[in-house]
Image (cartoon, rainbow, N blue to C red):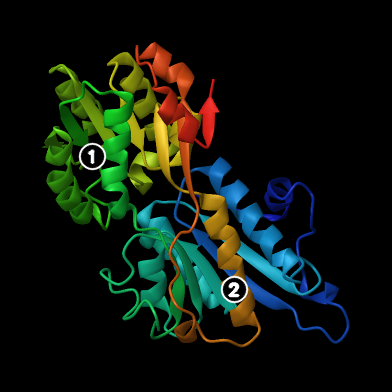
Amino acid sequence: MTVTIGRRELLAALGGAAAWPVAARAQQGERMRRIGVLIGSDDNTEARVLVAEFQQALEQLGWTYGRNIQIDIRWGSDPERIIAYTKELVRLSPDVIFAGPTNVVLPLQQETRSIPIVFVRVADPLGQGIVESLARPTGNVTGFSNPDFLLIGKWLQILKDVAPSTTRVGMMSSTMNAVSALYYRSFETLAPSLAMTPVDTPIREVVEIEHVFQSLAREPNSGLVIPGDVVLEAPSNRALIVRLAASHRLPVVYGRRPFAVDGGLAFYGVEPADIFRRAASYVDRILKGEKPSDLPVQQPTKYEFVINLKTAKVLGLTIPPGVLAIADEVIE
């Protein structure tokens, strides 16, 4: 499902913290600035929370709804809808566009080469041609990368730690994922080093999700890792994956936090709220006159490890005390 946030929805997302902006409300002598936001996700709950984090960080930097900024927000993952939203936002001529992940940044970059764009959740901005240099991006785009493919080894190690008997492991990623090839190269190299046989399980259609679980569950001591993926993260698909993991008693390590919150076994990855808050600092600097090309692409600095102990018990797993000790959150 795609969503365009209106006044009422934004107020709900922000807990009533600010009124929807109109230019007439700008204080005398202060210019009203316009920010476009495009989030490539169908997860309404997560999008609302993260956009609220972004807005609150802006407010701490002196940018307040109704006083000196106006924000136009769109979100959704349908490719045709993303193209439509991209054109809508560019026609509004905002001072800067905040966007992510890759599935919205690429069409935005094609639509405008002049409006500054600050991205988040882009796995490989250099390899995907979004920037020509991480240190000094050229053009109108910069932001905060999320190189999930560098976490493959960590996910595999966590799987081995929580389910030591695992000797066969799959990795599920949608073929629509722009960096799925990077995932699989790392996966095939690293899994054998932990005494696990890698099984490629790419998803071309959503109906194939169940087939992956059935195939892995046919052989004992199987497990699965699922990196960040817009298609698989959609709420309906996420619920299906968590349910299938439980019914097939398959240990799964995820690269996105909502899976663990919704009943998945474990999550390790970038702390998303931190990235959205940090991105506000780049939007602030651009609104104050700096150019995107002068702002280096930043890497994540905060990671989270979440264990769902309730799910572990359902799967018959005993989580070692050492693993529980290093978890940032244990869901019981």
Residue topped by disc 2: 283
| In the image: residue 96, left or right of residue 220 | right
Give 40 or 141, whichever is nearer the viewer.
141
Looking at the rendered structure, the secondary structure element under dot 1 is loop
Q: Is disc 2 surrounded by few (<14), some (14 to 19) or many (20+) residues within 10 Å?
A: many
* Residue for point 68% across, 47% down: 13
Give the residue type that dot 2 points to: Val
Residue 223 tag number: none
Give 290 or 135, whichever is nearer the viewer.
135
- The vertical placement of 196 against 282, above or below, is above
Instruction: Give the quadrant of the C terminus.
Output: top right
Give the residue type that dot 1 points to: Glu
Residue topped by disc 1: 205
* Quadrant of the image occupied by residue 279: bottom right
Task: Tell me residue 26's x, y (percent).
Answer: 82, 76
Q: CA distance from mark 2 to mark 1?
A: 36 Å
Q: Is disc 1 surrounded by few (<14), some (14 to 19) or many (20+) residues within 10 Å?
A: few
